[in-house]
Image (spheres, rainbow, N blue to C red):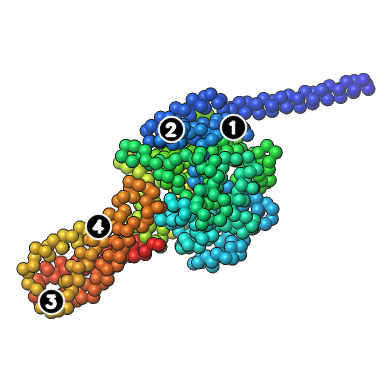
Amino acid sequence: MKVMRGALCGLMVWLWTAMAVGAAIDGQDLERQRLEQQAIERQDLEAFVDGFVTARMKADHVAGVTLAVVKDDALVLAKGYGAADLEAGRPVVAERTLFRPGSISKLFTWTALMQLVEQGRLDLDADIRDTLTDLPLETRYPEPITLRQLMAHTPGFEDTAMGHLFEDDPDAVLSLRDYLRRHTPAQVRAPGSWPAYSNYGVALAGRVVEEVSGMAWEAYAERHLLGPLGMRDSTFREPWGPQREGEPMAPALRERVSEGYQWVDGGFRPGGFTFVGGIGPAGSLSTTATDMARFMRAHLNEGRLGDVALLAPETAREMQRTHYRVALGQPGMAHGFIESEIAGYRAIGHGGGTVHFVSDLQLIPELELGVFISTNSNGGQALIRGFVEELVRRHFPTEPPATAAAPDNLARYVGDYLSTRRSYTTVEALLSHDMASVSLDRDGQLVLSRRGREIRLMPAQGEGHFRQADSGESLRFLTDDGGAVTHLAVPEPIMVMERVGPLANPRWRLAFLGLAGAVFAGSLVVALFGWGRPRACRPAARWGGRLTLLAAGFWVVSMGLALAGVLPIARDLGLVFFGFPPPAFVAAQIVAMLAGALSLGSLALLAPVLGETGWTPGRRLRHAGLVVLLALTLVTVWQFNGFVLMD
């Protein structure tokens, strides 16, 4: 009996062991199968990248490209294409050529903040004004501005850039502190409400790093970010002049920075070095593709690169978690990382652009995949668009997102939407605005028109939820308590689009100004050939007529000068930053002030004109209409902040 019990126990132990071993083997097989499915073949990857990049470089007029792909904590591909300097014949070399990735720099600033939070030296929910005591922020709302809000781009600031974001004179580059003092944007909404991308907000965060660490931003980045990661070919320093404290960019690095190009009149035109040092934490990084691969590996590996711990694992995970989103189901903001959906996977990353360079960095934690790509030409936006999407779809295909039946009333979403990322209080409101128009096509489906593209919107799960037919990216229309559509949440969580009517629509306002200018010019022509008409009897009526014609003339001159100042910007993007406002545009604003004063004078004298018996009723009516048009022009230019002179 004992023998039988022992044998039975032995059999049970054997069975349990076999089952455990079998389960372990099955688990290993499943894990191996998963890894095999997520593996990436370098030769196949390189063939795809070569074909994609070289074809797009030619089509989109891009002089040079650098890129890096990391997978499973290893550099899979790093490669350069084209020229870093066409005149010198210097090619792009991934491990040697420095590119300017612009706003991707912000990821380093957010990483620095999380290091200080991890050390207990910063609180993400404390008011930054308690730290930046020497930087008086003119805020409109009493609520605190926190680092958490800066990371989500919700401090409430308007977005301004013209004439100050970039600089082309090394001797004019401001320190971070001086820039923040001189170019403070208006706070136009309560902190923590709607998002609006803010370079200024990131620069504030960089200044917090300086105050808490006691080090200049560039020095902190070298000691605590670039140095530990072995990014020896990267720097936030620039070859600025002696007016800036601290050492400028090392000459050995400067000579390896790629030239930047614009495609103009059928050829590449070099643009020189673009300085971002005044707002360095938001965009002054110069780096190589292989250095950026090290940064991506660290963030994909919970803050570690080899034996170096950039962040503790729990801090790295917290940094990558979604902390803010405009609407349920929409991409949101991690701590500084911009969330998106790429080929069905959650991605976190950041794009970047300067006058000449266009770049993108995307991490897909589920795949342990990271991609960095940068171009040195203004056509790079078209090249980069869809690159990571195509790469992921090719190597890691997934099922397309589910669609749904069309809602009953699509017409309720039709309208114009204006981005919250814009200027509200400066003349930039006249010149720069991101608009989206939603309409119904002949098949009764919604079409989104934005940034020169028309995209069909496919209904998705949930009311007001749609996906772009080309990319599958999610959009959601938001409503107020009464059910009226008020906003459009686009795939970029750094902004939201506000629904606007015709009176607040910049396109309609500009169209009105163009029409008004034509009417004013026509009125001057009619007056020029109509001197023989009867004059007004009363002096007040005579002056009313004169002031009206003078106002119309001044408005025509102002509009002509404004066009003369703005049209060159269409040919040279650098003028937006380096040469704004041009003299002709400033003159247009001054003339507009005179035109506005004359318009008010003609409005004040309208009553005597209407009572003038020497004029026919038709002439009095035409005069009244012209005066009303003058007044409406004054109001429209006022709404565009056209009388606000920029320094």
Above-or-below relation of 101 to 123: above
Mark in front: 2 vs 3: 2
Q: Is residue 584 visible?
A: yes
State the separation of the CA atoms marked 4 and 3.
33 Å
> Which mark is drawn over residue 560?
4
303 vs 506, left or right, is right
Nearer-N-terminus badge (3/1): 1
Query: Could you tell me which secondary element the residue under label 3 belongs to?
Result: loop
Nearer-N-terminus badge (1/4): 1
Residue 557's x, y, as percent? Answer: 23, 61
325 vs 599, left or right, is right
> Which mark is drawn over residue 75?
1
Callouts 3 and 1 close, C-beta under 8 Å:
no
Q: Label 1 neighbourhood size at 10 Å, few (<14), some (14-19), many (20+)?
A: some
Q: Nearer the viewer, residue 215 or 480?
A: 215
Q: Quadrant of residue 634?
A: bottom left
Q: Nearer the viewer, residue 88 or 465?
A: 88
Q: Nearer the viewer, residue 216 or 377?
A: 216
Q: Quadrant of the N terminus?
A: top right
